[in-house]
């Protein structure tokens, strides 16, 4: 546990209220409970010595390990291969349901495929990000770890014969327990972890674990059967859809940006953020991606979550906050955890996110684009929801023309960001269309005037004549990959000379071997030290822009190249480092949302050409 595994060497499991990450050597090194944004119980991802972990791996033998998902499910299979035999560790979480609960289960099911192998199980939780002390009580029937706020019960699984070779496993000096046992061909053992269980530990039978496995498997396969995607990249699209579903908090319908916190954009650097929250922007993209696949129930969940946030903003008289906790609350105060060394020494580790207090005008366009897409699919809102929405748009009419913090949440001061103005135009445009489509009352004359004013301002001040391109903000000539969205939202025609010259400029300045940087932080200081990798979502946006601009062959090649950067399990983090490894929080919702949207755009255009 002294070395840090690569970010992409993790698999994700979850129960639709929280999630866990497991390395390809069988180490569970990230798990927060009872929610995504709760304190960690296992946080070895951010501190191998002090964060806590639960490792299951062979002992006393040389072995290789490989990982895969059970097809059509998020059940993670870690295979251990040695000269003595082949064993499999199946990790999954039974679905928790749509009612918020403190009780969650992680099943770690060991089965011997061939030969025999000795395994060691080391469970060392560290509650409250490693800050809360705990007690541990052990017995032949299991162990219970208790902190001030939460308990964790370890229930051994009985296969054929005894549970363990050693029935007595006292706590070690680090407050954990170590269990060893030998598996022989055909045997099933392992453990089931329970948070906040009201029952004492007990031995679980192999039949019980097998039933949980089959129930979880069947649930996910039934869900995936609802997908209507039949295009060229079905395996990647379906894996992305399942990943997004795993990052959904079922009680509210909110989608976290990532289930992790503190994974750096540059290893050893300070660009380390907490992404376990729900962004307005992500909700908008989620609806677009999931509706394209036929998942209308999930889209309805995100629309309901968004509608509630619009109502809250209207009642409070405040603008939409860019992000919220998964339960919709607004308090995301940022805090440093100096006792954690950070992934590979990438400090500081932050929980909470002060960017929640930023003004980002693009979220209004994201919200309205989402609602208009949902309306086209028959997901219409209530009269009360419409009244709340009109007041939010009226607020935007008065406040859109001001400096703001921008989509990338930089901390270098507010600017007149072109993307913020672009999405303000989208907000007015979609609101006008909704009012007309639904026949709802609205001050459409005012909205049209605002939309036209924004459009003219972007054309006059957002297009830099010297660069012959749309630029990041009005006071610079720096490019910004967020503007790749311009043709997709309908602001500019893909064949417009102003757009074509912008795309060529981005080719020169932001694209490196098909990968796309958000912007150049050296040329456009963002208030943060260090650099970052290429941004995965922006690369997918680039593919769409190429395809829509008539460069379909370039678009497909770039997309295929991008698929080679995914993890062995088909997962993407936020960014790709210059040497090709994944960096940033993992897996990242934006990356998988953009993959789905890009695949559907490419399929449609390739089919049309054929």
Image: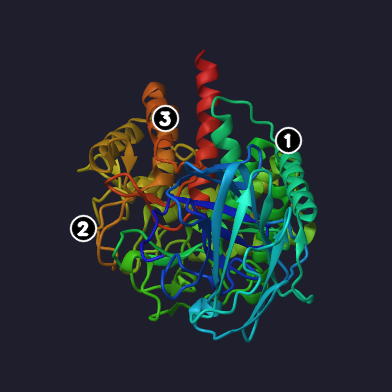
Indicate the quadrant where residue 543 lies: top left
Q: Earlier in the sequence, mark 3 or mark 2?
A: 2
Q: Earlier in the sequence, mark 2 or mark 1?
A: 1
Of residues 529 and 200, the one nearer the viewer is 200
> Label 2: which residue?
522
| Figure check: 209 above or below 409 | above
> Label 1: which residue?
225
Q: Secondary structure at mark 3?
A: helix
> Label 3: which residue?
560
Q: Secondary structure at mark 2?
A: loop
Of residues 418 and 559, the one nearer the viewer is 559
Q: Rounded to the nearest whole Å, what is the CA distance between mark 3 and mark 1? A: 25 Å
Q: Give coordinates of residue 393: x percent, y percent.
A: 60, 60
Q: Give coordinates of residue 129: x percent, y percent.
A: 50, 77
Indicate the quadrant where residue 342 lies: bottom left
Indicate the quadrant where residue 141 lies: bottom right
Which color scheme did the rendering employ for the protein? rainbow
Of the numbered discs in the image, which one, if any, rests on residue 493?
A: none
User: CB under 8 Å between callouts 2 and 1?
Assistant: no
Q: How many marks?
A: 3
Which residue is pictured at 38% across the width and 32% down the height? Answer: 561
For mark 3, does the 10 Å Cα neighbourhood hold few (<14), some (14 to 19), or many (20 or more) residues? Answer: few
């Amino acid at each position: 546990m002294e070395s840090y595994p690569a970010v992409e060497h993790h698999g994700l499991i979850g129960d639709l209220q929280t999630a866990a990450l497991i390395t390809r050597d069988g180490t569970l090194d990230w798990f927060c409970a009872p929610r995504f944004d709760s304190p960690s119980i296992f946080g070895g991802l951010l501190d191998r010595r002090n964060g806590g972990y639960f490792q299951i791996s062979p002992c006393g033998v040389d072995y290789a390990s490989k990982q895969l998902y059970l097809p059509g499910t998020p059940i993670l299979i870690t295979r251990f291969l040695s000269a003595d035999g082949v064993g499999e560790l199946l990790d999954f979480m039974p679905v928790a349901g749509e009612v918020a609960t403190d009780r969650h289960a992680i099943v770690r099911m060991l089965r011997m495929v061939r030969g025999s192998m000795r395994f060691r199980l080391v469970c060392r939780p560290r509650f409250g990000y490693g800050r809360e002390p705990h007690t541990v009580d052990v017995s032949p029937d299991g162990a219970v770890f208790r902190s001030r706020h939460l308990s964790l019960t370890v229930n051994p699984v009985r296969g054929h014969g005894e549970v363990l070779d050693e029935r007595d496993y006292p706590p070690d000096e680090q407050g954990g327990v170590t269990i060893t046992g030998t598996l022989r061909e055909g045997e099933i053992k392992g453990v089931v972890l329970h948070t906040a269980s009201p029952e004492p530990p007990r031995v679980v039978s192999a039949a019980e674990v097998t039933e949980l496995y089959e129930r979880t498997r069947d649930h996910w396969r039934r869900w995936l059967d609802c997908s209507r995607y039949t295009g060229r990249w079905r395996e990647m699209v379906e894996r992305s859809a399942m990943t997004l579903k795993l990052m959904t908090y079922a009680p509210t319908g909110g989608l976290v940006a990532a289930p992790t916190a503190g994974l750096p954009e540059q290893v050893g650097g300070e660009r380390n953020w907490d992404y376990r929250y729900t962004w307005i922007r992500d909700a908008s993209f989620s609806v677009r991606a999931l509706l394209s696949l036929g998942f209308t129930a999930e889209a309805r969940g995100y629309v309901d979550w968004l509608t509630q946030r619009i109502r809250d903003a209207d009642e409070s008289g405040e603008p939409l906050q860019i992000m919220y906790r998964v339960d919709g609350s607004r308090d995301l105060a940022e805090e440093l955890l100096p006792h954690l060394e950070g992934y590979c020494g990438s400090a500081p580790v932050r929980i909470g996110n002060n960017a929640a207090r930023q003004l980002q005008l693009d979220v209004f366009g994201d919200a309205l684009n989402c609602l208009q897409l949902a309306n086209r699919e028959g997901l219409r809102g209530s009269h009360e929801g419409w009244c709340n929405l009109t007041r939010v748009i009226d607020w935007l009419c008065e406040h859109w023309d001001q400096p703001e913090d921008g989509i990338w949440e930089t901390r270098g001061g507010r600017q007149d960001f072109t993307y913020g103005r672009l999405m303000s135009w989208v907000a007015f445009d979609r609101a006008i269309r909704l009012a007309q489509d639904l026949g709802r009352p609205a001050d459409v004359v005012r909205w049209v005037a605002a939309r036209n004013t924004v459009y003219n301002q972007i054309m006059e001040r957002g297009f830099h004549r010297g660069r012959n391109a749309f630029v990041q903000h009005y006071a610079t000539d720096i490019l910004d990959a967020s503007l790749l969205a311009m043709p997709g939202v309908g602001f500019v025609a893909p064949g417009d000379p102003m757009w074509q010259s912008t795309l060529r400029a981005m080719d020169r300045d932001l694209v490196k071997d098909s990968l796309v940087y958000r912007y150049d932080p050296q040329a456009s200081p963002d208030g943060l030290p260090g650099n970052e990798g290429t941004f995965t979502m922006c690369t997918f946006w680039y593919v769409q822009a190429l395809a829509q601009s008539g460069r379909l062959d370039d678009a497909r090649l770039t997309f295929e190249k991008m698929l080679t950067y995914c993890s062995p399990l088909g997962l993407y983090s936020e960014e790709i480092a210059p040497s090709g490894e994944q960096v940033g929080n993992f897996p990242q919702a934006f990356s998988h949302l953009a993959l789905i949207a890009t695949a559907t755009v490419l399929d449609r255009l390739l089919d049309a050409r054929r």
